[in-house]
Image (cartoon, coloured by chain):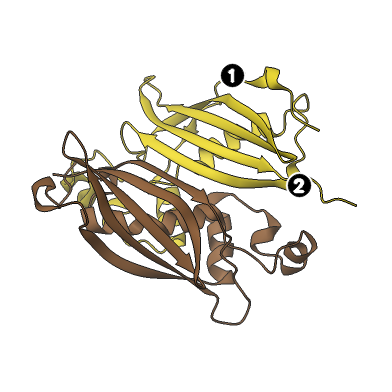
Chain colours: A brown, B yellow
Amino acid sequence: MTAKIAYDEVEVGTELPAQSFPVTRATLVRYAGASGDFNPIHWNEKFAKEVGLPDVIAHGMFTMAEAIRVVTDWTGDPAAVVEYGVRFTKPVVVPNDGRGAVVEVSAKVAAKLDDRRVRVDLLAMSAGQKVLGMSRAVVQLG
Amino acid sequence: MALDQSFVGRTYPPTPPYEVGREKIREFAEAIGDANPAYTDQEAAKALGHPDVVAPPTFVFSITFKAAGQVIEDPQLGLDYSRVVHGDQKFAYTRPVRAGDRLSVTTTIEAVKSLAGNDILDIRGEVHDEAGEHVVTAWTKIVSRAPEEA
């Protein structure tokens, strides 16, 4: 593993470059196919509304996959992520309006750990709401 | 109805091996819009010290969630799947998943709780490769929401 970020160069509070990830209905159909999760709440508006959702929602695992890109883009090596956990607090609602939704992710180093590891806390927002809670990664740095 | 506490600690038989393919990793990386070359370019992956392309950190969920189906669909447990939502998800890696891996999942029910009419299930999936080496542990919390009052 060769993370391009050196442990000695980061401090508690170091911010990772924030990113915004667009998500449309087409994105969700593609993710459904790639992940094998064909739950209709992610592509069928009629079904989603019947079960009490405001509209089609993104797969929680899609949002989780996007959020960690802030970390993997930072380290270069995806294998630098040795632990990653989230709580799904709010759904990302994806309207069929040609624009869809945006997931905005920011992250900062919350703690320096042993063995040249750090804990990174992530914040994922969509439409002004926090969509992932307790979102944390343990990252092996160089 | 509250779920049966006696299911805590129940372990299901290991799943048949899932073979991780390079093109499946590529498809997943494209679906999440991630152009990191470690997912698609063997040389780039080797330059990072990996024997082959690696999978994004959440890729393995497709495999562990399928394995967790043994629990979710266990008729003895009697979970109402139509009311299930994903609560939490966590992964702890010994090494990344990579192309060529043949992965087997052993699923255990870690906890069963009932809270305000919701059934909450903590499921742990231990993922091993063909040599029996640990690759990743996945913890999945699922919540079966209480039916609304009539």
Q: Position of residue A51 (x, y in %)?
A: 77, 59
Question: Pointer 1 and pointer 2: residues touching (CB < 8 Å)?
Answer: no
Q: Please identify the residue farthest to the left as the structure is shown.
A: A8
Per the image, label 2 sits on a secondary structure element best described as helix
C-alpha separation, residue under disc 1 versus residue under disc 2: 24 Å
Badge count: 2
Q: Is residue B54 visible?
A: no
* Above or below for A32 versus B108: below
- Is residue A109 left or right of B69 when viewed as pictured? left
Residue at (40, 54) in percent of width and height: B26
Q: Is residue A11 visible?
A: yes
* Above or below for B67 versus B43: above
Chain holding disc 2: B
Per the image, label 1 sits on a secondary structure element best described as loop
Nearer the observer, A123 or B51 = A123
Q: Position of residue B28 (x, y in %)?
A: 45, 54
Q: Residues within 10 Å of mark 1 (few under 14, many from 20)?
A: some
Q: Position of residue A50 (x, y in %)?
A: 80, 62
Chain holding disc 1: B
Residue at (59, 18) in percent of width and height: B9
N-terminal label among 1 and 2: 1
* Above or below for A132 versus A83: below
Q: Amino acid at mark 1?
A: Thr
Question: On the image, numbered disc 1 is attached to which residue?
Answer: B11
Nearer the observer, A7 or B59 = A7
Q: Position of residue A57 (x, y in %)?
A: 62, 63
- Is residue B109 left or right of B138 when viewed as pictured? right
Q: Amino acid at mark 2?
A: Ser
Q: Which mark is residue B67?
A: none
Q: Quadrant of the N terminus of chain B?
A: top right
Question: On the image, numbered disc 2 is attached to which residue?
Answer: B82
Residue at (56, 70) in percent of width and height: A26
